[in-house]
Image: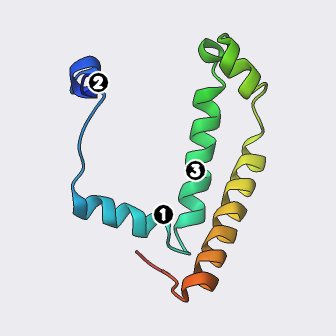
Amino acid sequence: MLPPPRTVLGPVATFRIGDGTTEWLLRLFNSVLFGPVLVGAFGVFMNRVLTRPELTGLPLVRHALPRRDPDPVVVTSAAFGTAFYLAVVAAATGRVVLLP
């Protein structure tokens, strides 16, 4: 029904990654040593992007993210959330990825 994103956004905003890269990224973000750190860093990045003045002027964003949380709060929350997720996955499957 909709056109492909590449035709609307252009080649700069869209790119494709292969199956091997996708598998490597999944293993990297689901590893015990790197996952919490990477998810925490991504959380801080998104916190800064989504709370920029240009976006907070939009009503939907203003109501969804009323203020910027301090970076330590975002990093801690994301890291502990990821560690909890990895513990649940380990308990459910019996498998743990230490390194990607």
- Closer to the chain start, of discs 2 and 3, is 2
Q: Nearer the viewer, mark 1 or mark 3?
A: 1
Q: Position of residue 2 (x, y in %)?
A: 30, 23
Disc 3 element: helix
Front-most of residues 71 and 86 = 86
Q: Which mark is residue 41?
A: 3
Using the numbered discs, state the Cα–Cα distance from disc 2 to disc 3 in whole angstroms: 36 Å
Q: Amino acid at mark 1?
A: Phe
**Residue 20 position by quadrant:** bottom left
Using the numbered discs, state the Cα–Cα distance from disc 1 to disc 2 in whole angstroms: 33 Å
The answer to whether residue 42 of the structure is visible from this angle is yes
Q: Which residue is located at x 48 percent, y 80 percent?
A: 97
Q: Position of residue 99 (x, y in %)?
A: 45, 78
Q: Is residue 18 above or below residue 4?
A: below
Disc 1 element: helix
Q: Which mark is residue 29?
A: 1
**Residue 85 position by quadrant:** bottom right
Q: Which residue is located at x 32 percent, y 65 percent?
A: 23
Disc 2 element: loop
Q: Are marks 1 and 3 in contact (CB under 8 Å)?
A: no
Q: Which mark is residue 1?
A: 2
